[in-house]
Image: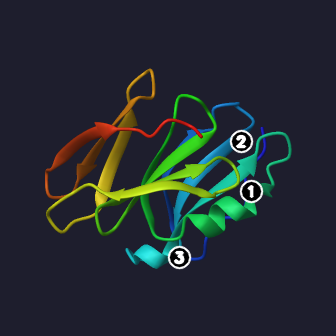
Amino acid sequence: MHPLGVPWDGGATDEVRFDPAGEHVVALCRHSGWVAEAQSLRSYALATGKPAHAALEEATKGVTTFAFHPDGARVAIGKLDGEVVLLAYPGGEVLASQKVLDKKGRVTAIAFDPAGARMAVGSEKGEIAVFAVPARA
């Protein structure tokens, strides 16, 4: 086993998941404090331990949580303002976005149903929203 990547100076890893193909570990990295712009997803190749998917990191600045869609080709990210963005994985292109939470507060949890047709989103204010996921184009 080898360590993956280099830790952020003064930062933390808040969430970590294997990608759907099992080839990368994707981590929500907090670079410093709880500043939304200082958070992003970072992907590491399991074979080498080196960072991968730089476009994904750039596209996810300000992320508060994330979940992979069951199809493996999309990832949903939550934002500080209650918005959820559906991105292509691993490229990071925006496929859809929607403000889903009424109260001010960051998105703290995202889950897809097994078929990937619905997404549940939770907030730090206790809200839960469930909505349909757009079909792949």
**Looking at numbered disc 1 in the image, what kind of residue is underneath it?**
His
Mark 1 secondary-structure assignment: loop
- Taking the image as shown, residue 59 lies to the left or right of residue 6, namely left
Q: Earlier in the sequence, mark 1 or mark 3?
A: 3
Q: Quadrant of residue 33?
A: bottom left
Give the label on residue 10, or none.
3
Q: Earlier in the sequence, mark 3 or mark 2?
A: 3
Secondary element at image label 3: loop
How many numbered circles does the render carry?
Answer: 3
Seen in the picture, residue 91 relative to 113 is either above or below; the reply is below
**Disc 2 versus disc 1: distance between alpha carbons?**
10 Å
- 57 vs 28, nearest the viewer: 57
Question: x%, y% of residue 71?
Answer: 58, 29
The dot on residue 24 is 2
Q: CA distance from mark 1 to mark 3?
A: 23 Å
Rate crowding at label 2 as few (under 14), some (14 to 19) or many (20 or more) other CA atoms within 10 Å.
Answer: many
Identified at 70% across, 31% down, the residue is: 22
Q: Nearer the viewer, mark 2 or mark 1?
A: 1
Residue at label 1?
A: 53
Residue at (62, 33) in percent of width and height: 72
Side (left or right) of 43 relative to 86: right
Can residue 80 be seen in the rendering of this structure? yes
Locate residue 37, reporting x and y percent. 47, 77
Q: Earlier in the sequence, mark 2 or mark 1?
A: 2
At 60% across and 66% down in the image, what residue appears?
59
Q: Is residue 93 above or below residue 3?
A: below
Crowding near the residue tagged with mark 3, few <14, some 14–19, many ≥20 C-alpha atoms within 10 Å: few
Alpha carbon separation for disc pair 3 and 2? 24 Å
